[in-house]
Amino acid sequence: MGLMRKGRINIVITNRVLRYSYHKHATLDSLVDQGELELPHETIKDGAIINRSVLVTILSKLVRKKRWKRKDLFFCLPDDAVVIRPLQVPAALTEEEAISYLKNQLGNSFFLPFANPSISVEFLDEENQQRNILLYAYPKDKIVAFEEVFREAGLKPVVADLTSLSVYRYYYKRYRKENDHVLHIQWNLDALILTAFHNHKAVFTRYIKQSLNEQQLDLSRSEVEGIINEYSIEVNRIIDFYQYSISNGQANINLVLLSGDFPYLSEVQKSLKERISAEIFSFSDNEEELKYIDVLGLALKPYDLKKGSNT
């Protein structure tokens, strides 16, 4: 508990904005401050830091203004580069040994689309002296780049998370609805990130680039409908893929969580309701909640997160 006495900062950085919150504890009711800053164009692009000096300057000013010097920081990484892979390791291995084992097997028994990954694992069930696991991999250089910027600005980064995990955590802890197979759709201006959860664990993710920006939003009704229909078809394909490939025909998505900064989310919700049978849960009825849902979910992540759960 001593770690939480001084409070902590939570930051989510997207291609367009920086959202933050300051909480005394890992609870929603301990919120002290929250806000959002627009980032200059191409400070961040496709989840990577392009203009490091600008980002450092923005963060340093914020840290000085809020008196956050040397405070602990939880931050979200862009979801575009994460890889989730079901694998098996010898059942006798500890978590640390399993990670070492996987690093040795990388490039032989399985492959990743980037070099030098940061790896974590979720242990599942045992099967014939083998343990089923979920591998989570992320480019280590991206993590290090963000950590270095935060440290230079005066913060102390201690935990990195993903936006999809943060939104799911917020939904589950705030609404406490039990669903075995959940698909989170983070529908943003520039991309869709679809992440499937089973038993509160992220088991699959897909990143779909969308070529829109704020300068292209003066669209006609037919253009909006065309964009939504195009990507709604992709969502339907992902749901089918989950049913027949991920779950081997044994299960289907029964809840869809919808969030993101796409300005036509209500129209998206209507389109999805016409195409899929799963319940659709949207936070769009509460604009303030929708705006800060990712950073609030990040704020709910405890320091000593229980092993085996994303929540």
Image (cartoon, rainbow, N blue to C red):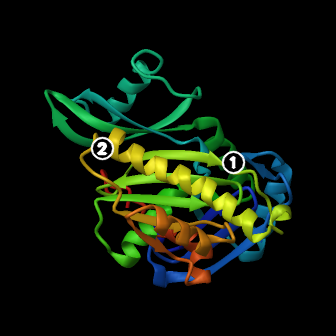
Query: Element under label 2?
Result: loop
Task: Work out how far the residue at label 1 is from the one at label 2, CA to CA, in angstroms.
Answer: 30 Å
At x 65%, y 41%, the residue is 142
Q: Is residue 182 depicted above or below 136 in this figure?
A: below
Residue 279 is situated, as x and y percent measured from the top left of the image, at 38, 69
Mark 2 closeness class: few <14, some 14–19, many ≥20 residues within 10 Å: some
The amino acid pointed to by label 2 is: Ser
Helix, strand or loop under label 1: loop
- Find residue 47 and name its label: 1
Say if residue 255 shows up in the picture.
Answer: yes
Q: Please tell me in which quadrant of the rendered image residue 103 appears.
A: top left
**Residue 195 or residue 115, whichever sits in front:** 195
Q: Is residue 302 left or right of residue 150?
A: left
Q: Residue 216 at x, y = what percent?
A: 83, 62
Place of residue 224 in the rendered image (x, y in percent of width and height, measured from the top left): 71, 65
Q: Circle 2 is placed at which residue position?
A: 247
Residue at the front extreme?
Answer: 222
* Marks 1 and 2, the one that precedes in the sequence: 1
Q: Amino acid at mark 1?
A: Gly
Q: Are marks 1 and 2 in contact (CB under 8 Å)?
A: no
| Horizontal and vertical percent position of residue 288 | 61, 82
